[in-house]
Image (cartoon, rainbow, N blue to C red):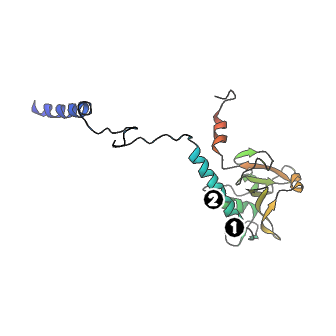
Amino acid sequence: MRRVTIPAFLAAAMFFGPLAGRGLPAQSADKPGSLLPIPGQPDKPFAALSSTILAGRDSLTKLSRQQVRLRYQLGAVKPGSAFDCSGLVKWVMSMFDLHLPRTAEEQARLGLEVPRDTAQLLPGDLLFFGHGQRVTHIGIYIGDGKYVHAANQRKGVIESQISASDERWWKGARRLFVDPDAIKSLFSSPSGT
C-alpha cells in the first residue's frame, strides 16, 4: 500500500501544484518572469522574409557584377578565369543555395514566368534568349534595365543594357527568388480568400 501512495501523491502534486500556489508560470505572453516567454507576433509575418529576399537580391547583384571581365569559355562552370552563359548563372545561383541544371535551355524552365517588361523585373531574375523555339543564351538581371551574362569569346562576361535590338531574341524571364506577395497569390483563390 505504501508503494502506491507515494507515486499517487507525487502525481497529484504535479497535477494540482500549479493550481494551488504561486508557482512561476511556464509560458505567459504578458508576464516577463515566466520560464518560457511566448514570443510576440510580428505585425507582418512576411516582413522578415521580405528584407531577407531584398538583401539576397543586393548580394546576388554584387556577386554577378564581380564576374564581369572574366573570359568566356564554353563549358566552364567554376569561378576563376572563365564562364559560359549557363555556367555563370549556375555558379552565381549556387552561392545562394539554388542548384540549377547545366544548360540555358534547362535553366529557362525554372521558377515563375515574369513578363518581358523591365519595369516588372527584379534583380536576380533570369533572362533567356534564343532564335525560334530554342533557348541558347541566359543572363542575370541586375536592375535598371541591365543584366550580366557571359556573351561570347570576344567579349567575355559583361554587363549589358536591355535594348530594343534584344526584343527579337529575348524569349522571356523567370523568377527564382519569389517575394512573399507572389507566394500569397499562388495560394489564394480567384475569389480572394
User: Which image quarter is the C terminus in?
Assistant: top right
Q: Nearer the viewer, residue 169 or 120?
A: 120
Which tag, 2 or 1, sits closer to the chain's start?
A: 1
Residue at point 68%, 55% (across, down): 101
User: Which image quarter is the N terminus in?
Assistant: top left
Disc 1 marks a residue whose amino acid type is: Gln
Q: Residues within 10 Å of mark 1 (few under 14, many from 20)?
A: few
Give the percent coordinates (x, y) of residue 184.
Answer: 63, 38
Q: As displayed, is residue 34 above or below residue 72?
A: above
Q: As displayed, is residue 130 above or below residue 23?
A: below
* Residue at mark 2: 94
Q: Residues within 10 Å of mark 2 (few under 14, many from 20)?
A: few
Disc number placed over residue 54 in the picture, else none? none
Give the percent coordinates (x, y) of residue 172.
Answer: 80, 49
Number of numbered markers = 2
Write down the quadrant of residue 58 in the picture.
Answer: bottom right
Disc 2 marks a residue whose amino acid type is: Ser
Give the percent coordinates (x, y) of residue 88.
Answer: 71, 62
Write down the quadrant of residue 78 in the picture.
Answer: bottom right
Q: Are marks 2 and 1 in contact (CB under 8 Å)?
A: no
> Is 67 left or right of 7, judged from the image as shown?
right
Residue at point 69%, 47% (across, down): 111
Task: Label 2: state its secondary structure.
Answer: helix
User: Which is closer to the viewer, label 2 or label 1?
Assistant: 1
Task: Label 1: state its secondary structure.
Answer: helix
Disc number placed over residue 66 in the picture, else none? 1
Residue at point 65%, 41% (across, down): 181
Give the percent coordinates (x, y) of residue 115.
Answer: 79, 45
